[in-house]
Amino acid sequence: MRNLLTGLATLLTLFFAGHQAEAEEHQEDVWAECRADNSCTIAYDYLSDQENYPFLFLGLEVNSSHPRWRDYKNTLPLYPHVKDCLIESEQSVSEPNLLRIDWPRTGTGPAAEICVFRIARSLGSVERILQWLEFHGFEHRGQNRIISEERAANSSLRVVAQITARWSIEQYRQLNPSFLARLTGYDLLQEYNLVLGFDKDGFLAEVRAGTPTNLN
């Protein structure tokens, strides 16, 4: 009986591993053809800007009275419109391609948080946001509720659901190389995270970036 159970467990493991690999291959194939000729695009609802769709943190507009104002006050004026987050060729067209974020310019800190917020708000749906993240190589497990719908209805919490997207440390180091890590072969950082928070009405309420370390 033990051998039978072990055999069934092995078959189930191989079955689900095969389906996972197939799903990952399919996900990659979604963009493979258009990547070849640089024709990938993604639909969006509108082009967000600071005036009509201000940058939020914990569901509150980040302005001089916000407790995180000091973290963003110098960066916000550089990206007042979603177009400002894109590569130069997309900034002057009426219908820009929101896949073409200028990562080398935005980096992975406050500017990335602002720009991913502007892009995600423009995309207008969780499905498109997930597609955008996948195009840029982020791994994710979809949107997860951190508080039930029943509790959210009467809760003062402004973030009730999240998408956590991850880059490996190798992907992160493509934008942020570390001489010390290359020299020693050891990197203090584990990965790069983008956490997109949503309010009880389903609207984007914040974007946070982080780099968990091996000291945590």
Image (tube, grey):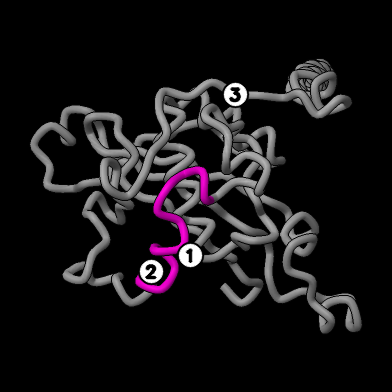
User: Would you name the residue on which mark 1 appears?
Assistant: 110
Q: Answer few, some or many: residues within 10 Å of disc 2's Cα (few below 14, many 20 plus, some between 14 and 19).
A: some
Whether residue 74 is in magenta: the answer is: yes
Q: Is residue 117 above or below residue 190?
A: above
Quarter assignment of residue 171: bottom right
**Of residues 150 and 139, which is closer to you in this image?**
139
Q: Amino acid at mark 3?
A: Ile
The answer to whether mark 2 and mark 1 are in CB contact below 8 A is: yes
Residue at the image position 65 percent from the left and 51 percent from the top: 102
Q: Which mark is residue 72?
A: 2
Q: Answer few, some or many: residues within 10 Å of disc 3's Cα (few below 14, many 20 plus, some between 14 and 19).
A: some
Disc 3 versus disc 2: distance between alpha carbons? 28 Å
Q: Amino acid at mark 2?
A: Tyr
Magenta residue span: 73-84
The quadrant of the rendering that contains the C terminus is bottom right
Residue at the image position 47 percent from the left and 49 percent from the top: 195
